Image: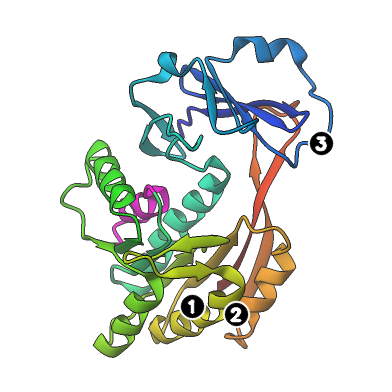
Amino acid sequence: MNDEYELLDSGNGKKLERYGDIILERPAAQAVWAPQFSNRWKNATARFDRVGGLNWEGRNKVSKPWNVNVAGVTMKLSATDFGHIGVFPETRALWKWIREMLDKQAKKKGRALKFLNLFAYSGGATLAAAQSGAQCCHLDASKGMVDWARENAVLNNLTDAPIRWIVDDVIKFLRREVKRGNRYDGILLDPPSFGRGKKGELYKIEDQLRTTLDLVDQVVSDDPSFVILTSHTPGFSPIVLRNLLAQYHDRGTFECGEMLLTGKPDVNDLPNGNWARWINE
């Protein structure tokens, strides 16, 4: 499967990544080791840092959006003021897993599955799920990010795919879904450490995550396939995430691990968040 993302190197609190023809240097506080390939860093197209503010060097070279294929999904990228570019490639292994699991389970159950993506950002997981034929619900509190995800759907010829695009606060939305009786076979949630809802509602992971998971447990179908919980919040280790999911399920399989930025075999993997999942099998 074509993939135009590659980690080129990391170290000294930074990461060097290739997105198609664009090479970016950006902060990675966890990269406390020395770089492996010091000669590669001079090839950066643009650099971003947070020293004394939010600063781009060479941003004129990436002033226009560009498209890359990540794990079989075409994504529009853009150099935002905050240093994000529209994709978190450490999640690409999860996209592949979701696409394959939904396809396998749909064949097993003899029907299309329903997939819910919460805190869904620019839609990589949503579109990977849609590629499997799943009926998807994509939710994010930011209208701008939902619009971005819809642009990505167009790039992937998924304009007419059965995707609900929702701009809302996650907890308010889930409470309405419980009342409406809507249920989902596969659910992914990637709660932020700190965020704001559609109308400015405060979301702090320490305060709201268990409420969110309580509601998620009420919208899983009678015969669900999986629930995946990911986090970039320090302290929310793979085991912490696994233990949170284990509160709601007394059967099935639990798996957990680190989300990794990866490159060629000789390049050190760069951990960037954690994941856990419950599989109903």
Instruction: Say whether residue 250 is visible.
Output: yes
N-terminal label among 3 and 2 = 3
Residue, disc 3? 32
Q: Are marks 3 and 2 in contact (CB under 8 Å)?
A: no
Which residue does the numbered mark 2 point to in the structure image? 252
CA distance for labels 3 and 1: 34 Å
- Please state the extent of the stretch shown in magenta in the rendering: 122-135
Q: Is 170 left or right of 135, judged from the image as shown? A: right
> Vertical placement of 248 versus 30: above or below?
below
In the image, is 28 to the left or to the right of 38?
Answer: left
Q: Which of the two marks, 3 or 2, is nearer to us in this view?
A: 3
Q: Amino acid at mark 3?
A: Val
- Residue at position x 49%, y 69% in the image: 203
Taking depth in this image into account, of 274 and 267 the one nearest to the observer is: 274
Residue 183, by quadrant, is bottom left
Gap in Å between the C-alphas at discs 1 and 2? 21 Å
User: Circles 3 and 1: CB distance less than 8 Å?
Assistant: no
Residue that numbered label 1 is attached to: 212
Residue 178 location (% of width, % of height): 33, 86
Up/down of 212 relative to 255, above or below: below
The residue located at (35%, 78%) in the rendering is: 172
Residue at figure coordinates x 65%, y 52% from the top left: 273
Regarding mark 3 in the picture, which secondary structure is present there? loop
Of discs 1 and 2, which sits in the foreground?
1
